[in-house]
Amino acid sequence: MFTIAPVTRVRVSADPQAEVVAELQQGTELEVLGKKEAFLQVSAWHPRRGRVAGWVHRSFVGGQKPESVHAVDAAIVDSVVPRCHACSNANWALVPFKHDYAGGHPNIPTGFLDSIDVKARVCLGCGLVELCLDKEGRKRLTEWLKQR
């Protein structure tokens, strides 16, 4: 078995919110020691820490060593769903978001009366909330940065 995600987090228990023991790079060979729900107990060689053991989510493990990571164009990047930093879940909900002060929306000012709205998304796996830009916001930000 091999890790198929760019980074796979090894955790101390079969819980998406458990402490991270190590982060393994894509293509790391794993020895499966056990199974529990959606997690696999594994042992792997870490370049700095030596042999590490812990739990990884099954979605990050595959039977074949992945090909080397190739450069991808922006269209592919836009279609990839980001994973939660806490639990590695890929299910997000976009929600309305306002600052507590003045009732305003968070934004990135790009001119005197121009700005890019910032969105909030909530991980449906663990409830983590993070701010982000939607596709249109990323496009406007890229254009604004080119003009500077």
Image: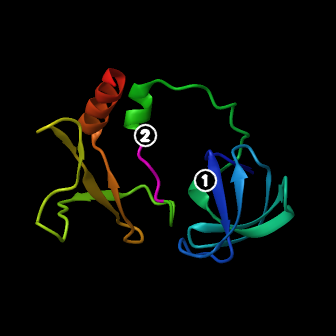
Q: Which of 59 and 76 is in front in this view?
A: 76
Residue 140 falls within the magenta-colored stretch: no
Tell me if 61 is positioned left or right of 95 in this view. Answer: right
In the rendered image of this protein, does residue 79 appear above or below residue 40? above
Q: Which of 95 and 4 is in front in this view?
A: 95
- The quarter of the picture where residue 138 lies is top left
- On the rendered image, what quadrant is the C terminus found in? top left
Label 2: element kind: loop
Labels 1 and 2: the sequence-earlier one: 1
Which range is magenta?
80-84
- For the rendered model, the colour scheme is rainbow
**Which residue is painted at 30% across and 25% down in the image?**
143
In the rendered image of this protein, does residue 70 appear above or below residue 129? above
Tell me if 53 is positioned left or right of 103 in this view. Answer: right
Label 1: element kind: helix
Residue 74, horizontal then vertical, whole percent? 42, 27
Tell me if 80 is positioned left or right of 142 in this view. Answer: right
Magenta: main secondary structure equals loop
Residue 26, horizontal then vertical, whole percent? 69, 44
Which kind of residue does numbered mark 1 sit on? Phe
Camera-near label (1 vs 2) is 2
Q: Of the numbered discs in the image, which one, if any, rests on residue 80?
A: 2
Residue 13, horizontal then vertical, whole percent? 65, 77
Q: Of the numbered discs in the image, which one, if any, rests on residue 60?
A: 1
**Which residue is painted at 61% across and 53% down in the image?**
60
Farthest right residue? Answer: 50
Crowd rating for badge 2 (residues with CA inside 10 Å; few <14, some 14–19, many 20+): few
Tell me if 105 is positioned left or right of 26 in this view. Answer: left
Q: Of the numbered discs in the image, which one, if any, rests on residue 32?
A: none
Which kind of residue does numbered mark 2 sit on? Val
